[in-house]
């Protein structure tokens, strides 16, 4: 089923970038501020066609992005929407302020620092379970799985691959779950 998404950002360039990426996966609406976002969100709920994904700028001109996120969650609660059925919200921000990042990750589903990185956004949406992984990624995983199941890969090669995978997991985990230091990359 196609993904329904809402982009909430006052910067036209960011709107266009996100809209171009997200329309490849389904219907994408754009709101320029928090007020428009809440109208669109309420209308989508009223029509029985809620958004699957909301890309929400934290630096909106009317309501702050965090305030919009709190209103979205409150509206979902009022409508009896279970947490596992709620809209996935990725904060879009230029801020590296750790307090903002922590607040967003507690109520939302991740964040991406501006400028928008297309591959990172797609990977985050895949990780949220909203879209399937790109075909080349699926083919690579399937080929690797087939090799491992055939028991033709020597043990020392498998051990080396496990070390590489562990390093990759550590890097990606550090990126997704920043420590108390200021974040230095994109996260979801």
Image: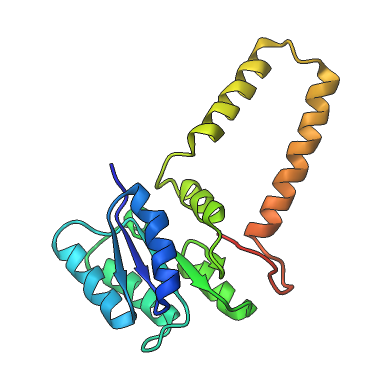
Please report the residue visible at 48 percent of the width from the left and 39 percent of the height from the top: 133
The residue lying toward the viewer, choosing from 110 and 144, is 144
Residue 42 drawn at (x, y percent)? 21, 70
Residue 173 drawn at (x, y percent)? 67, 53
| 156 to 129, vertically: above or below | above
User: Is residue 54 visible in this depiction of the protein?
Assistant: yes
Q: Is residue 111 left or right of residue 10?
A: right
The residue lying toward the viewer, choosing from 80 and 129, is 129
User: Is residue 88 visible in this depiction of the protein?
Assistant: no
Please report the residue visible at 43 percent of the width from the left and 45 percent of the height from the top: 129
Indicate the quadrant containing the N terminus: top left, top right, bottom left or bottom right: top left
Q: Is residue 2 left or right of residue 110?
A: left
Residue placed furthest toward the left: 47
| 179 to 168, vertically: above or below | below
Indicate the quadrant containing the C terminus: top left, top right, bottom left or bottom right: bottom right
The coloring applied to the image is rainbow
């Amino acid at each position: 089923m196609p993904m329904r998404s809402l982009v909430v950002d006052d910067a036209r360039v960011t709107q266009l970038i996100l809209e171009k990426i997200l329309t490849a996966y389904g219907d994408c609406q754009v709101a320029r501020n928090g007020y428009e976002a809440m109208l669109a969100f309420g209308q989508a709920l009223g029509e029985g066609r809620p958004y699957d994904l909301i890309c929400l700028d934290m630096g909106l001109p009317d309501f702050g992005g965090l305030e919009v996120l709190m209103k979205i969650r409150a509206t979902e609660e009022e409508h009896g929407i279970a947490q596992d059925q709620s809209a996935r919200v990725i904060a879009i921000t230029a801020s590296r302020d750790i307090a903002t990042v922590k607040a967003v990750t507690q109520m939302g589903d991740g964040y991406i620092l501006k400028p928008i990185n297309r591959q990172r956004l797609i990977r985050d949406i895949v990780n949220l379970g909203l879209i399937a992984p790109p075909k080349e990624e699926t083919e690579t995983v399937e080929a690797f799985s087939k090799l491992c199941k055939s028991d033709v890969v020597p043990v020392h090669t498998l051990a080396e691959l496990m070390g590489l995978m562990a390093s990759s997991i550590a890097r990606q985990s550090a990126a997704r779950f920043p420590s108390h230091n200021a974040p230095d990359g994109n996260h979801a």
